[in-house]
Image (cartoon, rainbow, N blue to C red):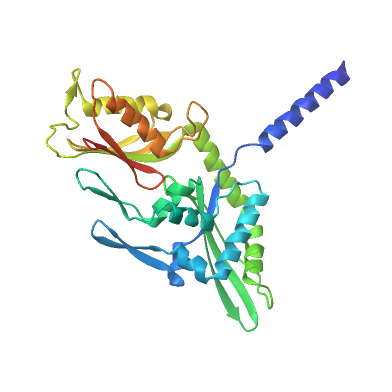
Amino acid sequence: MFKKCLLTLCFLALAMSQVMGQAKKPTIMVVPSDAWCNTNGYVQTYDDMGMSKTVSDYSAAFSNDMELKLVIAKINELMADRGFPLKDLEATMASLARMQAEEMAITSKTSGAEVAESLLDRLRRVAKADIIIEIGWTITHQGPRSTLTYVMRGIDSYSNKQIAGSTGASQPSISAEPVVLLEEAILSRIDEFNIRLQSHFDDMFENGREVALDLRVFDNGSDIDFESEYDGYELCELIDEWMDANTVMGRYSKLDGTETRISYEQVRIPLFKENGAAMDTESWARQLRSYLRKEPFLLPVKVVPSGLGRCILIIGEK
């Protein structure tokens, strides 16, 4: 009897260890840091509603810098060896080109209103990686010896918040290639870095993914705004009720509320739909659009994604 119980306990322990070992990991995409791109001249400018903004030019970097390709390939290899699923930056950029996603604005069919979206925002929206790893490095020379110093950050793709960081340097070397120096510098620190990534992802499973939502009303003569009443309640109140019911544990912050604009931040949405499919900001926002299209509202609503972690709902436009 004792042996039978012991065997049962061993089996349960083995099963639990297998389940823990198979815990879902976040999808990763590795990109060069803005600082590295700026230092090496790989930047471009775009127009954001009349304002000129500078962003990293990944296409130019990949076309001209073999060292970058080798560094990203090495980090991808290190992360894959530890079980993290990957999105390849260069392949994602090729998908963007094929999808003609280089347009700098999405324009309303009727009003001509524009919502600008940077290349990085579109890149994140197409890749749908959970976490972006930014890597930057410099090499210093002292006599015949070279030392590589790196800075690595883990960024939540949806909230754009830093969730992990790591810095370090290799030992001085005479003959080692940069990618070898980088591996040497990172290896002793990467597991601690990954623990932070996994901890953040585990928190999302429990408390939801953090996104943002803006609602706007166009002044197109329809006399609809967020103070319009339905069954004795203002539209803004009914939207708040929908948010209470359709966020994880009703968690969100309402930053701004006027007749024509409402802004929500720190909105926690489920990682998955009821059918088990992944939930992103746009698919979640479309659920609110469906709600506003039904009785008693019957409102035309346009959903405009702005990057991966923010959506704009434009009421009165289609």
**Residue nearest the observer in this picture, 74 or 135:** 74
Quarter where residue 67 is shown: bottom right
Is residue 132 toward the left or the right of residue 104 in the image? right
Relative image position of residue 282 (x, y in whole percent): 39, 38
Relative image position of residue 92 (x, y in whole percent): 50, 53
Residue occupying the point 40% across, 54% down: 100
Question: How many numbered tags mark residues here?
Answer: 0
**Residue nearest the observer in this picture, 237 or 308:** 308
Relative image position of residue 2 (x, y in whole percent): 87, 18
**Residue nearest the observer in this picture, 16 or 114:** 114
Q: Is there any visible trace of residue 112 in the rendered image? A: yes
Considering the image in quadrants, where does the N terminus appear? Answer: top right
**Residue nearest the observer in this picture, 84 or 173:** 84
Residue occupying the point 68% across, 32% down: 19
Quarter where residue 18 is shown: top right
Quarter where residue 13 is shown: top right
Above or below, 88 against 44 in this view is above
Q: Is there any visible trace of residue 153 in the rendered image? A: no
Above or below, 246 against 110 in this view is above
Considering the image in quadrants, where does the C terminus appear? Answer: top left
Q: Residue furthest top?
A: 1
Residue occupying the point 66% across, 64% down: 184
Residue occupying the point 56% across, 46% down: 196
Relative image position of residue 291 (x, y in whole percent): 31, 26
